[in-house]
Amino acid sequence: MTRLALLLLAPALVWAQETLHVGSKRFTESYILGEILTQTVRSAGEARAVHQQGMGNTAILFAALKSGAIHVYPEYSGTVAFELLGLQRVPGISELNRELARDGLAAAVPLGFSNTYALAMSMPHAAALGITRISDLARHRDLRLGLSQEFLNRRDGWPALRQTYRLPFTAPRGLDHGLAYEALAAGQIDVIDVYSTDAKIGRYKLKVLVDDRGFFPAYDAVLLYRLELPQRFPRSWQALRKLEGRISTEHMIAMNGAAELSAAPFSKVAADFLSAPGEKRQPAAERAGRSFVDAMFGRDFWRLTLEHVVLVFASLAMSVALGIPLGIWAERFPAVRHWILGAVGILQTVPSLALLAFLIAALNRIGTLPAIIALFLYGLLPVVRNTEAGLSAVPWLLKQAATALGLSTRTTLRLIELPLAAPTILAGIKTSAVINVGTATIAAFIGAGGYGERIVAGLAVNDHVLLLAGAVPAAVMALLIEWGFAVLERQVISPGLRKRGNGRL
């Protein structure tokens, strides 16, 4: 009986544990390190560890850490000094921590390797042009640079590098880090930014250019965490401290290779390292042993599906709750119609990532809430416009007849106008839902989960199978929603009204 009771209570005890949230950025190495931290915390048995993977760039992770949305994530000393604190050099950990303490944060646990930035070219091209150093680039103004968006905009990235070396290039092409190697190999660009632990440097036979003016400092991998973490999760913190110095540069390159060249899941790469940290596993045959079906119906399939459904339908419910009243108001009062339709139209033109960044700053948090609010705002236009259009199309004589029968304006709206406008309104709601299915994939950039999590991870490692494993379920969900609304229309709208409804936007 005692064993049975413990077995029944086990799930409740797990969920009763506090949750320690681990974050990671949107590139291979950060995914792997995030998994190593997550599995280390789980092994301590003190807290539920959740990996908020691929949350975005440095600014998003830093904001999440300050707000308490995550408790720890892997970072680099150079990034902390230059990008986060705005310092002119990379000081020691103690000085960094004096600055970080103002935000309730600290850095500790040097993992044992450094991953600095570098510029690279294909070896044959570099040899043909006689380029071995970054300063040599200044002699070749026609070179095409493809740099990651973060490197283009960070303080210790392209602007400062260009000034230090007096490079003549004014508009490098912005390119996702995971795609840059293939673009270089295809001859579409000539120079890319790389990390010194990238496994693809050897695979693509690249020439890493010498930083002859010492611009790039050491970027030692450390843990950036909230000051409350050691006191709140003491056993987990002790387990994390044991990672200090355990990951060499060779280990990190091998782990990156296992993920990028062999398509090993990040969780497996981390588990292999933790089970035998002294071994350097070399990548097996590229993309071996995994089919599209295996990738799509992996262990995370139902979790991602639930997250995507919540994002789509929670935001849709909010869009309907506000959009229909706004559409009614726009139809009733011509003086405000232009302002209402104009406002919801403008919301559609705001870039999704820009809106998410604004909401993160406004709400001081990341994850599901800002994602749902962004999707709610994007979903307003079809609902508002179709409600206004449907009500405007109700014949004026029917409204007059209702008035002659003594019906109030509210009763006429409820019993006559809304039923007649229902096909058009429902078409707008359907359009909003389908749009949100695709737009919700962007929410993965701020740790809100959903199918976009796979798409972001696939971009990070240029894994087309993983990309499709996220894109196909999203497309299927959009088709199911389309079919579901068709069934709903047949159930709640009479055939005569269905013929009248034209589904206008």
Image (cartoon, rainbow, N blue to C red):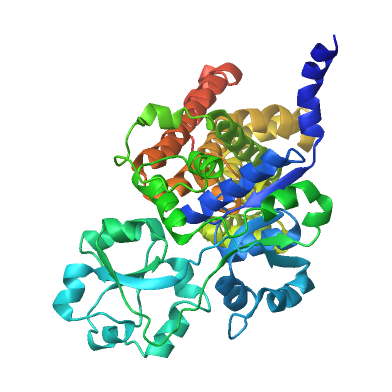
Along the horizontal axis of the image, is 321 left or right of 174?
right
Is residue 376 something that shows in the picture? Answer: yes
| 274 up-or-down from 126: above or below | above
Q: Considering depth in this image, is 374 or 441 the residue closer to the camera?
A: 441
Whole-percent x, y for residue 128 in the image: 14, 76
View extreme (top): residue: 1
95 or 330, which is in the foreground? 95
Q: Residue furthest left?
A: 128
Towards the viewer: 238 or 47: 238
Question: In the rendered view, does 105 fall on the left or right side of 82?
Answer: right
Q: Residue at x 68, y 29 (%)?
A: 416
Look at the picture and state if 405 lies above or below 75: above
Q: Quadrant of the N terminus?
A: top right
| 423 vs 290, nearest the viewer | 290
How many marks overall?
0
Give percent across and percent down for residue 361: 68, 64
Q: Position of residue 421 (x, y in %)?
A: 60, 33
Residue at screen point 56% across, 32% down: 305
Q: How far across and how far down the image is residue 220, in percent?
A: 55, 68
Q: Is residue 233 visible?
A: no
Judged left or right of residue 65, residue 258 is left
Q: In the image, what residue occupies the spot 38% across and 88% down?
A: 165
Quadrant of the rendered structure where residue 145 is? bottom left
Q: Is residue 404 above or below residue 58?
A: above
Residue 446 is left or right of residue 195, and the answer is: right
Residue that extends furthest to the front in the rendered view of this protein: 278
Residue 470, quarter of the rendered image: top left
154, above or below 62, in the image: below
- Residue drawn 35% across the image and 45% down it: 283
